[in-house]
Image (cartoon, rainbow, N blue to C red):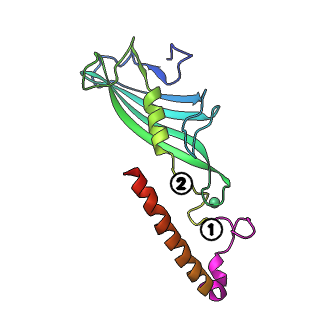
């Protein structure tokens, strides 16, 4: 049903257009031609984004409901290992038959272009601080190896020194942050 093979996420709505209550479902698998996401997590070029669309003819437009499924790649912020982040998001948007001020999206030549909506939904769902595991222990500051056991195991011997270090670093932070804050104002 796609008449624009070069445009991803563009779908014909001819058969439900102006047919109130008529519905059609479309499944799209689109390979990205560019990376989505600028941060630590992103969906890479060449990855497939799958979308289950439901198109519903309404009085003033086409209601598009989408379930999006893809996988982002990221680096764990604690141990720096590469992780796959499953992305499952959805949106619902009304594409107006005739453009209005309230409705941002409209039907063009009996087609709806969902690319921006799919992209925004995916990018906004990407984690800012991806983790390989909720309980990731990060790297051992001494060996640089990924920790498999909590460092607190040595806590009985190290505890007083850690406490002293902690006090030092926290005073460092407060003294260092004050002049910086003043500069900004
Ligand atoms: Zn990790």
Tell me which residue sits at (27%, 24%) in the image: 58
Badge 1 density bin: few <14, some 14–19, many ≥20, Cα 10 Å: some
> Rounded to the nearest whole Å, what is the CA distance between mark 2 and mark 1?
14 Å
Q: Which mark is residue 137?
A: 1
Tell me which residue sits at (58%, 43%) in the image: 72
Q: Residue 2 location in percent, x, y? A: 51, 17
Badge 2 density bin: few <14, some 14–19, many ≥20, Cα 10 Å: few
Q: Is mark 1 within 8 Å of ligand 1?
A: yes
Q: Which mark is residue 129?
A: 2
When asked about the image quadrant of residue 146, the answer is: bottom right
Disc 1, SS: loop
The magenta stretch spans residue 143: yes
Residue 176 is left or right of residue 17, and the answer is right
Q: Is residue 75 above or below residue 172?
A: above
Q: Residue 33 location in percent, x, y? A: 61, 26
Tell me which residue sits at (40%, 56%) in the image: 182
Between 171 and 155, which is closer to the camera in this rendering? Answer: 171
Label 2 close to label 1 by CB (< 8 Å): no
Q: Residue 134 location in percent, x, y? A: 56, 63
Q: Is residue 73 above or below residue 78?
A: above
Q: Which residues are magenta?
A: 137-159
Q: Which mark is residue 153?
A: none
């Amino acid at each position: 049903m796609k008449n624009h093979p070069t445009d991803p996420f563009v779908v014909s709505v001819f058969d439900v257009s102006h047919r109130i209550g008529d519905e059609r479902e479309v499944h799209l698998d689109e390979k990205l031609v560019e990376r989505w996401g600028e941060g630590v997590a992103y969906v890479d070029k060449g990855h497939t984004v799958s979308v289950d669309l439901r198109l519903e003819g309404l009085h003033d437009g086409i209601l598009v409901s989408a379930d999006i499924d893809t996988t982002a790649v990221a680096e764990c912020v604690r141990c720096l290992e590469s992780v796959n982040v499953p992305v499952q998001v959805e949106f619902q948007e009304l594409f107006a038959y005739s453009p209005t001020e309230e409705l941002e999206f409209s039907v063009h030549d009996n087609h709806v272009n969902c690319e921006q909506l799919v992209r925004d939904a995916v990018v906004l769902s990407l984690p800012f601080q991806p983790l390989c595991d909720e309980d990731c222990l990060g790297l051992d500051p001494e060996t640089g190896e990924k920790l498999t056991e909590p460092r607190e195991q040595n806590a009985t011997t190290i505890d007083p020194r850690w406490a002293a270090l902690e006090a030092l670093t926290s005073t460092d932070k407060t003294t260092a942050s004050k002049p910086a804050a003043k500069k900004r104002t």
